[in-house]
Image: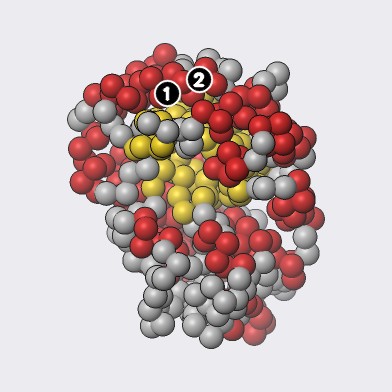
Amino acid sequence: MEKRMLGKTGLSVSEIGFGGEWLERHPREEATALLKYAGENGINIIDCWMADPKSRDIIGDAIYGRRESWYVQGHIGSVWQNGQYVRTRDMKYVKPAFEDLLTRLKTDYIDIGMIHYVDSEEEWRAIQDSEFLDYVKELKAKGTIRHIGMSSHNPKTAMLAVQSGYIEMILFSINPAFDMLPADEDLDNLLSEGYQYDRSLAGIDADRAQLYRMCEENNVGITVMKGFAGGRLLDKERSPFATALTPLQCIHYALTRPGVSSILCGFDTKEQVDQAIRYETATEAEKDYASVLANAPLHSYRGECTYCGHCKPCPAKLDIAMINKFYDLAAMQPTVPASVKAHYMLLEHKASECLQCRLCEARCPFGVGVADKMKKTAELFGC
């Protein structure tokens, strides 16, 4: 299993992670065995936003005796009241719920303490001067949580978190369908089966693109939730593109977004675990989402680089996708950030070495003018 650094946390996480929300659907022993199986096959990060005792007990059983092999995203503000999940900042409930998480996971620390589910910009601002945030920072100071993260579905709110300086990683919903949509503070709009996608939408929403680039520039890692859009992308009849993607294509899409370290998949069976981790040995053709999206009747990323790698091989040995990524990161700023330029300068071959042969353009599913972009990049970075 390939590993990636999760932003400034320094944690080396598996590209394929475990989203734990489906665990409670299974008998405890069966679910525990499933999670252990994932760990045995190289998965080392799990998200536990769930407040229900059963899910937490399952995770605790599965990681017991192998705690150091797992990185846990444990959510603060997700509580269990009267037999149901509630999201709250009320410390009367928040503290006992987090203490319950530690107890049921049979651990004295959580690797990433997640500020749970902030989609409203108003709520983000309210949290900044609150007992809730004081508690989160106190937990970190004590070492009870090692890092601070946040979960969100709204790119505008997530960008505020990235700019805060103390948020080290983001759990964000990423898939080709959501990426078309403008920021929304109501998650139900995104998840609704009846949501009508605007057929005029094309390419990635500007706020979402800016969030991914901002995360990469500021070394704020991203773990991905809802990578399959609740399964809709795998079903031609339910997909907003009127064509189906495969799990491997959805995984590859998420992992090619700037800043992304891991996609957290929900698993019901060991076979589904096998299917996801086969990503590590899959062919480029099997992972290719670009051709599907470029030819989808309701969608196209025309003219936008999605870093899919179809431009390879380059006779000048340029890593075109990476060069485009650094250009996009730099071009969104008034001046080129020193950190971005430093990363660009580490590339073995620079944009100025482009032969202008345009062979890459013939292979690009989205019609990106690569040669012209190489010229702009060379001018921007000076080489």
Between marks 1 and 2, how big is the CA–CA gap? 7 Å
Q: Is residue 257 above or below residue 262?
A: below
In front of the other: 181 or 375: 181
> Image point 40% across, 24% down: which residue?
97
Asked whether disc 1 touches disc 2, contact meaning CB atoms under 8 Å apart, the reply is: yes
Name the amino acid, label 1: Phe
What residue is shown at x 20% (from left), y 30% (from top)?
A: 129
Where residue 245 sits: x, y (%)?
63, 70
Near-viewer residue (168 or 240): 240
Mark 1 neighbour class, 10 Å CA radius: few under 14, some 14 to 19, many 20 or more: many
Residue 93 image position (x, y, % from top left) = 32, 25
Could you tell me if residue 297 is visible in this image? yes
Per the image, the residue denoted by label 1 is: 98
The picture quadrant where one finds residue 181 is bottom left
Q: Is 347 rendered above or below residue 249?
A: above
Asked whether 359 or 28 is in front, the reply is 28
- Counting from the top left corner in percent of width and height, residue 349 is at 63, 61
Give the label on residue 102, or none: 2
Residue lying at 61% horizontally and 36% vertically, measured from the top left = 45
Picture quarter containing residue 32? top right
